[in-house]
Image: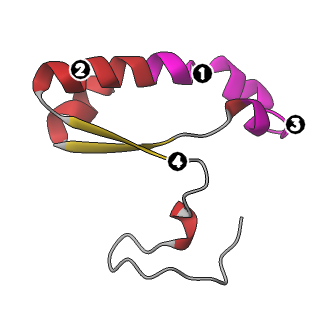
Amino acid sequence: MSSKIINENQVIVLEDLKVKNMQQNRCLSKSISEVSWAEFRRILEYKAKWYGREIIIAPQNYASSQICSECGYKNPDVKI
């Protein structure tokens, strides 16, 4: 999966999330803990450097779910 992402994109943006906070959700905690997010990020960063791709880490407080990916409009009514 990491190779596919690197090969198909020049710029990859990752959101820097607090996995510990996400694990507080009882329905998802086991699934989240079984996935090695840090290792996947490390592999992406290594391959991006190797192939000359750019990785951007969006900060935790970035309102990504409120911003339209097409036009950039920030919808103040959408809150998570």
Callout 4: SS: loop
Q: Quadrant of residue 61?
A: bottom right
Crowding at mark 3 (Cα within 10 Å: few <14, some 14-19, many 20+): few
The amino acid sitting under disc 2 is Lys
Crowding at mark 1 (Cα within 10 Å: few <14, some 14-19, many 20+): few
Residue 35 pos. (x, y %): 60, 21
- Looking at the image, is mark 1 or mark 3 earlier in the sequence? 3
Q: CA distance from mark 2 to mark 4?
A: 21 Å
Of tags 1 and 2, the one toward the viewer is 2
Q: Which residue is mark 1?
A: 35
Callout 3: SS: loop
The coloring applied to the image is secondary structure
Left or right of 34: which side holds 54? left
- Looking at the image, is mark 2 or mark 4 earlier in the sequence? 2
Callout 1: SS: loop
- Looking at the image, is mark 1 or mark 4 earlier in the sequence? 1
Residue 69 pos. (x, y %): 37, 69
**Residue 52, label in figure:** none
Q: Which residue is mark 3?
A: 26
Q: Is residue 54 visible?
A: yes
Q: Which residue is mark 4?
A: 59
The reply to whether callout 1 and callout 3 are in contact (CB within 8 Å) is no
The amino acid sitting under disc 4 is Pro
Crowding at mark 4 (Cα within 10 Å: few <14, some 14-19, many 20+): few
What residue is shown at x 40% (from left), y 18% (from top)? 42
Q: Which residue is mark 2?
A: 47
Q: CA distance from mark 3 to mark 2?
A: 34 Å
What residue is shown at x 54% (from left), y 40% (from top)? 16
Observer-nearest residue: 56 or 12?
56
Q: Which residues are magenta?
A: 20-40
